Amino acid sequence: MSVKARPEIELLTAYRLPQTAGVKLNQNESPDDWPAELKADVLRELERLPWNRYPPVDAQPLREALAAVVGVSPGMVAATNGSNEALLALVQAFASGRTVVTTVPGYSMVPVLAVVGGARVQQVRLRQDFSLDVEAMRSAVARPDAALTVIASPNNPTGNRFDSLGIEAVLDAAAGLVVVDEAYGDFVDESFVSNVRSRPNLAVLRTFSKAFGLAGVRVGWIIGSEPVIAAVGKALPPYNLSLFAQETARAALRRPDLMSARVQRIVDERRRIEGGLRALPGVEVFPTETNFALFRTPYSAAGVFEALLHRGVLVRDVSRVPLLDRCLRVTVGTPRENDCFLDALGAALEETR
Ligand code: PMP
């Protein structure tokens, strides 16, 4: 007799993406690896520390450093294996057996993690211009069953930031916890972190995977009221964050100069990609405040995707997402990678025509 998982797990498709390509622009990673001397500093520190012992419980030293960055107490911060683990812990702590509200288009893992965490999902469509449908959101989040709402701002895969008054209006109406996922928050000046103190039903998510260039190390964090963080802390497995992840994140926080220089380089390159895309006949580029750009091709997205891949350039086909007919998403790479992408896209469009 074969063993079956829960029916909703059997129905899910496992997360798989191509991980290698000449020019890999499909996962919104940082194009630059960490400087060798910084890696060496972390490795030296790891050599000094005992590997036979569990790491600091609740990643306490890292949480203290993170709390200092945003000016809250360590009890208002939880550290996780990427923000994905934060999302799952939030679902488990607040929403199992109840409903998670999110946007569509929105971060694709939210509905999946909600189901894995035993919740139902309600996806509220954005407006045609990718702005938040504030009235539709307000009525969805006001339902007593809506235990958790997740809004990514800037949003993935659309790239735009939502109007903060709209998010505030959703917070005002929400029956449960509202999470503003700021995975791309390092690329914009505004943040909801400063609202956490006055809004006990708000939590903010951040990650080291994008602007910090540490996707491989897996560190994310949550800023929320002490009761919210205490609940998440009970849902997370003890010692969830490895010694390596804790030490690397702490090292990253000691070098904010490095991060801001990277952000500036990415934003400059993104503007160049946006210009290059705009110059291609029939291509529509959407406004972005992230390290990626969303664009609509005049032809089938699958055809253009394949033609790009044929030239060694891997992007993300998001054309099956509601409102994103014929759309592809490209991550900002190094200047050379971005040139390759623009050249390959020009040729791919000629070929697909
Ligand atoms: N939120 C958003 C909006 C994202 O785009 C991503 C990564 N693509 C994540 C969360 C998860 O990132 P990580 O788990 O690496 O922190």
Image (cartoon, rainbow, N blue to C red):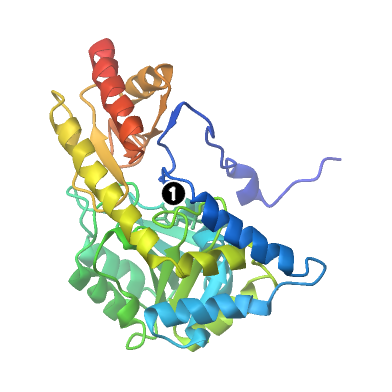
Kind of element beneath mark 1: loop
Q: Nearer the viewer, residue 255 or 309?
A: 255
Above or below: residue 306 compared with residue 176: above
* Rendering quadrant holding ligand 1: bottom left
Q: Is residue 35 left or right of residue 281?
A: right
Q: Can residue 242 be seen at all in this image of the molecule?
A: no
Residue at the image point whose x is 72% and y is 49% from the top: 5
Task: Report x, y in % for residue 127.
Answer: 20, 52
Residue at which label 1 appears: 108
Task: Report x, y in % for residue 115.
Answer: 55, 56
Above or below: residue 301 compared with residue 103: above
Q: Is residue 313 left or right of residue 127?
A: right
Task: Report x, y in % for residue 147.
Answer: 46, 73
The amino acid type, in three-letter code, at marker 1 is Ser
Residue at the image point whose x is 27% and y is 21% from the top: 343
Residue at the image point whose x is 59% and y is 79% from the top: 61
Position of the C terminus by quadrant: top left
Q: Can residue 214 be seen at all in this image of the molecule?
A: yes
